[in-house]
Image: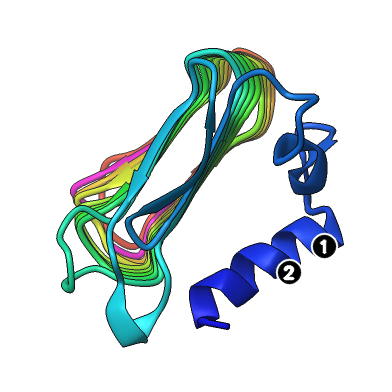
């Protein structure tokens, strides 16, 4: 058995849970909208779910799995050039794309959720919640996670950035940076790091804003509901 078939067989046998439903049940007749594609071969397609993948060769399988009405998943986009990508979309009108690189992973769980991991290697994007969006790319080893309804997280245009948006309608953005992080924990909170290195922004309370721009080795922390912490100089820490 090829390595790609072993991977999918293991998923089905193990019943990997996503969105409360297992791969085993998705591959059966009880799910109306499901699509699974591995290394350019469409294994399952039913209903309005769509998926695509390309052959990853000996370097690792590209796997795309979509489940839900109008769900869509794509893993890899250049045959023989991109390998080891995983895209999983579960939920009505959900979208997952893991493309233009190696070892990227995108998972979208929820109605109208979207996850994109591309334009680099070993990027991770996780969107959980209706209308959530996570995007990682434009570099290597970036991580984005949006886990609240209408939350958005973006990490990239550099290497090893992290963006986590956990609150309802929250926004976390760590872009045009390297080794930086943005964390938005409160409802309607915003954490923003842009064009910095080794900087951090924490928006911990509801409707808080933490922002670092153009400066390195800086930290902004917004704890009190409704407050704004903004860094204007390098090597600076601002709290509110």
40 in relation to 224, above or below? below
Residue 112 image offset from top left, x and y in percent: 51, 14
| SS state under label 2 | helix
Badge 1 marks a residue whose secondary structure is helix
Q: Which corner quadrant holds the N terminus?
A: bottom right
Position above or below: 92 against 123: above
Q: Is residue 240 visible?
A: no
Horizontal and vertical percent position of residue 238: 48, 43
Circles 2 and 1: CB distance less than 8 Å?
yes
Image vertical order of residue 66 relative to residue 155, above or below: above
**Label 1: few (<14), some (14–19) or many (≥20) C-alpha neighbours in 10 Å:** few
Q: Quadrant of residue 235?
A: bottom left
Q: Which residue is mark 1?
A: 13
Where residue 67 sits, quadrant-wise, is top right
- Magenta span covers which residues? 209-219
Total marks placed:
2
Kindly identify the residue that appears in the image at 40 percent across and 37 percent down.
51
Q: Nearer the viewer, residue 88 or 169?
A: 88
Residue drawn at x 51%, y 81% as measured from the top left: 2
Q: Is residue 183 left or right of residue 219?
A: right
Give the CA separation, mark 2 to mark 1.
Answer: 5 Å
Relative to 226, 141 lies left or right: left
The label shown at residue 200 is none
Q: In the image, is 164 to the left or to the right of 39?
A: right
Q: 110 above or below 90?
A: above
Q: Residue at x 74, y 46 (%)?
A: 23
- Can you tell which quarter of the image residue 81 is in? bottom left
Q: Which residue is mark 2?
A: 10
Residue 217 magenta = yes
Quadrant location of the C terminus in the rendered image: top right
Q: Nearer the viewer, residue 18 or 180?
A: 18
């Amino acid at each position: 058995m090829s390595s790609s078939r072993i991977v999918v067989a293991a998923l089905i046998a193990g019943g990997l849970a996503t969105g409360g439903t297992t791969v085993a049940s998705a591959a059966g007749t009880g799910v109306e909208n499901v699509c699974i594609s591995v290394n350019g071969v469409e294994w399952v397609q039913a209903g309005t779910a769509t998926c695509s993948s390309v052959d990853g060769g000996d370097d690792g399988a590209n796997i795309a799995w979509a489940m839900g009405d109008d769900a869509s998943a794509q893993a890899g986009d250049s045959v023989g050039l991109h390998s080891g990508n995983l895209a999983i979309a579960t939920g009505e009108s959900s979208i997952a794309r893991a493309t233009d690189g190696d070892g990227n992973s995108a998972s979208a769980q929820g109605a109208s959720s979207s996850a994109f991991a591309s334009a680099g290697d070993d990027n991770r994007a996780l969107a959980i919640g209706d209308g959530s969006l996570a995007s990682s790319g434009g570099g290597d080893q970036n991580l984005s996670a949006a886990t609240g309804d209408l939350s958005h997280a973006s990490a990239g245009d550099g290497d090893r950035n992290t963006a986590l948006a956990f609150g309802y309608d929250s926004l976390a953005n760590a872009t045009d940076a390297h080794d930086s992080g943005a964390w938005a924990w409160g409802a309607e909170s915003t954490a923003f790091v842009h064009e910095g290195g080794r900087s951090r922004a924490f928006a911990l309370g509801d409707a808080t804003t933490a922002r670092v721009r153009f400066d390195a080795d800086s930290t902004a922390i917004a704890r009190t509901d409704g407050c704004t912490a903004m860094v204007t100089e390098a090597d600076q820490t601002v709290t509110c």
